[in-house]
Image (cartoon, rainbow, N blue to C red):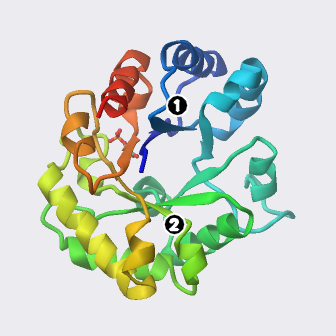
Amino acid sequence: MKKIIAANWKMNPESAKEAEKIVKFLVESYTEKNVQLILFPPFVYFCRLRDELDNDADKFDWGAQDIFWEESGAYTGEISSAMLKSFWVQYVIIGHSERRWKLGETDEIINKKIKTALENGITPILAVGEKEKGDSVEKFLEDQLCKGLEDLDEKQISKIIIAYEPVWAIGTGSADNPEDTIKAVRIIKDIIGKMVGKEITDKIPVLYGGSVTSENARDFLSEKEINGALVGGASLNKEEFLKILNIAEKL
Ligand code: PGA
């Protein structure tokens, strides 16, 4: 399985010009093929980035930071799956802790978004993780996975990606350690295994996210059970992000 490196830019950078600089730098400096690189820019930059990059846009995969569950209609401010697909979006982050805890997104909403993404051929990256250090990892993961994946059949579950992101590690500079991440990955696989069996579960990629940098990326990515990283802050610093990509590339 190729390592997946996903760049979650969140509500950054401040201008489309800055966004373009990061992407153009990546086009020029990152030419290898051993990593699956997925970029998640804010919605408003898609148009410009796709236009500016033209054919080079195909060098990466593109993802959205959110999706709405209805196809169209009177939903002010929302973005539909069809709109995302018109910009070649193939992935979407769903259940990110910033949406769960800062914007009140519930497991029910997350479940609807996952279903909509799958129905429209967009791969959901479902983010899960405990809130505080010391919280019961099992309890959080069981709850978020069972509710988030409710009523999905085996075929649907086989298409998702999971990102384990302990909330206390996000944007704090204090990453989890690989041993505890592996324990969490095993818990995730056990929970999903009970839903769809081991064979399908083994093929579901699980990424780690939370203060990944070029300093700690190797520790996580060299573990077989960790299939990649969801990188926030460090993905906005182009030189730093390139270092992470090169680490993943050479593993
Ligand atoms: P971080 O963010 O790398 O800045 O901690 C990760 C994420 O929120 O996906």
Q: Residue at x 49, y 20 (%)?
A: 30
Location of the C terminus (image quadrant): top left
User: Dots 1 and 2: beta carbons under 8 Å?
Assistant: no
Q: Residue at x 25, y 79 (%)?
A: 139
Q: Amino acid at mark 1?
A: Asn
Q: Residue at x 51, y 66 (%)?
A: 105
Q: Residue 153's quadrant in the figure?
A: bottom right
* 127 w.r.t. 50: above or below: below
Q: Amino acid at mark 2?
A: Glu
Q: Residue 179's quadrant in the figure?
A: bottom left
* 179 w.r.t. 219: above or below: below
Label 1 lies in ligand 1 vicinity (Cβ under 8 Å): no
Q: Position of residue 235 (x, y in %)?
A: 42, 30
Mark number displayed over residue 105: 2
SS category of the residue bearing label 2: loop
* 98 w.r.t. 52: above or below: below
Q: Front-most of 197 and 168?
A: 197
Q: Give left or right: position of 208 versus 18.
A: left
Q: Front-most of 149 and 243?
A: 243
Residue under numbered circle 1: 12
SS category of the residue bearing label 1: loop
Give the image quadrant in which the ligand numbered 1 is located: top left
Q: Residue 204's quadrant in the figure?
A: bottom left
Question: Which of pointers 1 and 2 lies earlier in the amino acid sequence?
Answer: 1
Mark 1 Cα shell of 10 Å, populated few (<14), some (14-19), many (≥20): some
Q: Give left or right: position of 44 versus 135.
A: right
Distance between mark 1 and mark 2 Cα atoms: 21 Å
Q: Position of residue 157 (x, y in %)?
A: 53, 74
Mark 2 Cα shell of 10 Å, populated few (<14), some (14-19), many (≥20): some
